Amino acid sequence: MRNRLLLPLVVAALVVAPGALAQGWPSKPIKLIVPFSAGGPTDQLSRYVGQKLSVAMGQPVVVENVVGAGGVIGLERMAKSTPDGYTLATSASTLQAIATHLGLIPYDTVKSFTPIGALAAFPYAVMVNANSPLKSVADLVARAKAKPGEVSAATPGAGTGTHLAAVLLAQRSDVQFNTVQYKGAAPIINDILGGHVDFTFEVIGSAMPLISSGKAKTIGTTGTKRHPLLPNVPTVAETIPGFDFVGWFALYGPPGLAPEITRRLNTELNKIHDSAEFRQYLETRGYQTLPGSAADLAARQQAEFVKWGEVVKKLPAAAIGK
């Protein structure tokens, strides 16, 4: 009889336990996995946001760099962690919306993650040598039409965001580029400055020192609106209507993260987005603020998953390293 009386109490405790745990969260430091090396743009932004969240949450947010396999190792570790709100990760649009089209990855980019909120958007500059005769995207397209396959596009590897930006530009303008693959961004910059390749896509924040110093120039930006750091530079879309290539960073949790924790984190993220200090931080680095709900992030990821699936399926397997 005693066991029969206790059973309803045990069941009730199990039902309310998740909510009770969420209400007491956080009670210890939170780990924020950054799947790229320390000192890079993802790491810097994550540490900035992590410090702001530490203040808001009353617990340290400790960044852990887990590198390897282009970000996959760190995200896999987060996806397999306990969904108690104490392990989160920063990811990027290339990993969430593009990577799954390029080959096997050890997780499902939808089922293995809980979207929390976006951190920032980053459009690219179409960058050329300072002395390049190319003065506009129209010039670039015209030359590629006149000399199919001869205009060189530098990218840091098959399947990267920069590579697919060049692919998207070629598809939307109906031209062919000679895609030159490099092992990283540094040798690309050297060859752009040396005039050995015709153009590349570079994150605007990273391109600005080269542009400001006169060592390189940009003939277009990839967002839907002109960038505030380059107000006199037309968007690619002004020449090729509908062209849009904007990467983003976002915060994710493991699958099954409690809705209360997701809402709390998203609320604090949007407070950070609302601050003038954060907006200035982003603007000086070429980023753009990207507030919104967890549902907004999920919808953005899904829309880009569909978009990039259409781009990738038109490519031969060799073009994406398969």
Image (tube, rainbow, N blue to C red):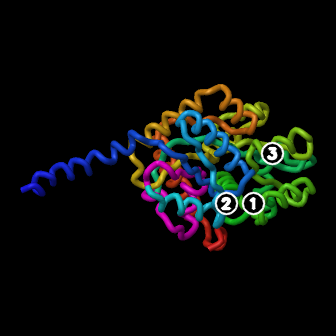
Name the residue type under label 3. Answer: Ala
Q: Which residues are magenta?
A: 83-112
Whether residue 249 sits left or right of residue 205 in the image: it is left
Q: Dot 1 lies on which element?
A: strand
Quadrant in which the N terminus appears: bottom left
Reading the chain from its start, which is encountered first: label 1 or label 3?
Answer: 1
Report the disc number at residue 155: 1
- In the picture of the structure, the residue carrying the numbered disc 2 is 160
- Give the farthest residue toward the top: 276
The CA span between labels 1 and 3 is 14 Å
Q: Dot 2 lies on which element?
A: loop
Name the residue type under label 2. Answer: Thr
Cβ atoms under marks 1 and 2 closer than 8 Å? yes
Q: Position of residue 214 (x, y in %)?
A: 92, 41
- The quarter holding residue 270 reads top right
Name the residue type under label 1. Answer: Thr
The CA span between labels 1 and 2 is 8 Å
Q: Badge 2: few (under 14), some or many (20 or more) residues near its Cα, within 10 Å?
A: some
Report the disc number at residue 207: 3
Report the disc number at residue 303: none
Q: Residue at x 63, y 54 (%)?
A: 64
Q: Position of residue 164 (x, y in %)?
A: 66, 58
The CA span between labels 2 and 3 is 17 Å
Name the residue nearer the viewer: 270 or 217.
270
Q: Position of residue 143 (x, y in %)?
A: 81, 54
Q: Residue at x 66, y 69 (%)?
A: 319
Whether residue 9 sits left or right of residue 107 in the image: it is left
